[in-house]
Image (cartoon, rainbow, N blue to C red):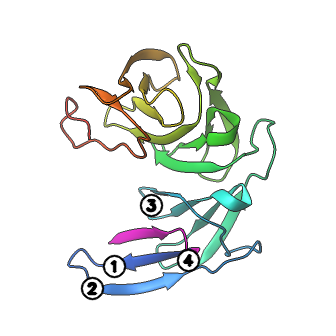
Amino acid sequence: DVYVVDGRNSRIQKFRSDGSFVMTWGSSGMEPGELSGPAGIGISRTGGVYIADTGNNRIQYFSKDGVYLGQFGKGGSADGMFNQPTDIAINSRGEIYITDFGNNRVQLFSLDGRFLRVIGKKGEGRSEFIGPRSVFVDEEDRVFVMESYKKNRIQVFDSMGRYLRKFGAAGKGRAEMEKASAISLISQPDNIF
């Protein structure tokens, strides 16, 4: 199945891999199951669908058929709170990484929404972010975080959140980016797109 975050329409659309439409869920609002400018999506191994409900500063989760199951987070800057969550990635242990764009960090949660830890803080050095936009976890549970606001770089962390390396920079030359918006990897660990 293919899930599409239809941000401007505040809904999720589900298709089969051949492109045939299956269903849609969500509508604009603040109540459980309603969305406001959703931006990111993550699918757990058990089929749970996790949505970065950006405008409502929360994460909502649904069954694979769009049944509302719960939510966590609210607006703020304390641990477990969000200021524009923009993307979601789920590691092999079923832990959820969420880019917290406005708070300049990545937060880690359990599948049921229990806060676990933070990666990063505001800044321009190692393990620091200015507007983290996208997150991806590879097969070895390394965490790739892309910043798009000022630095336009990708920082890589191990499964415990320890800094490993960075690549990319702001600009128009080779290995430079402007307004980078998403990151994904194919199954071969040396290829990043």
Q: Which residue is mark 3?
A: 46
Instruction: Name the spot of residue 95 as percent of width and height, x first.
Output: 53, 42
Between marks 4 and 3, how big is the CA–CA gap? 27 Å
User: Which dot marks residue 15?
Assistant: 1
Between marks 4 and 2, how big is the CA–CA gap? 19 Å
Between marks 3 and 2, how big is the CA–CA gap? 23 Å
Between marks 1 and 2, how big is the CA–CA gap? 5 Å
> For the residue carrying disc 1, how many other residues have a C-alpha within 10 Å: few (<14), some (14-19), or many (20+)?
some
Q: Which residues are magenta?
A: 1-10
Between marks 1 and 4, how big is the CA–CA gap? 16 Å
| Left or right of 135, for residue 131 | right
Q: Secondary structure at mark 2?
A: loop
Quadrant, the N terminus:
bottom left
User: Which dot marks residue 9?
Assistant: 4
Amino acid of disc 3: Thr
Q: Secondary structure at mark 4?
A: loop
Residue 16: quadrant of the picture: bottom left
Marked residue nearer the N-terminal end (3 or 2): 2
Q: Are marks 1 and 2 in contact (CB under 8 Å)?
A: yes
Please tell me which residue lies in front, 140 or 100. Answer: 100
> For the residue carrying disc 4, how many other residues have a C-alpha within 10 Å: few (<14), some (14-19), or many (20+)?
some
Instruction: Name the spot of residue 114 as percent of width and height, x first.
Output: 70, 45
Q: Which residue is mark 2?
A: 20
Q: Is residue 107 magenta?
A: no
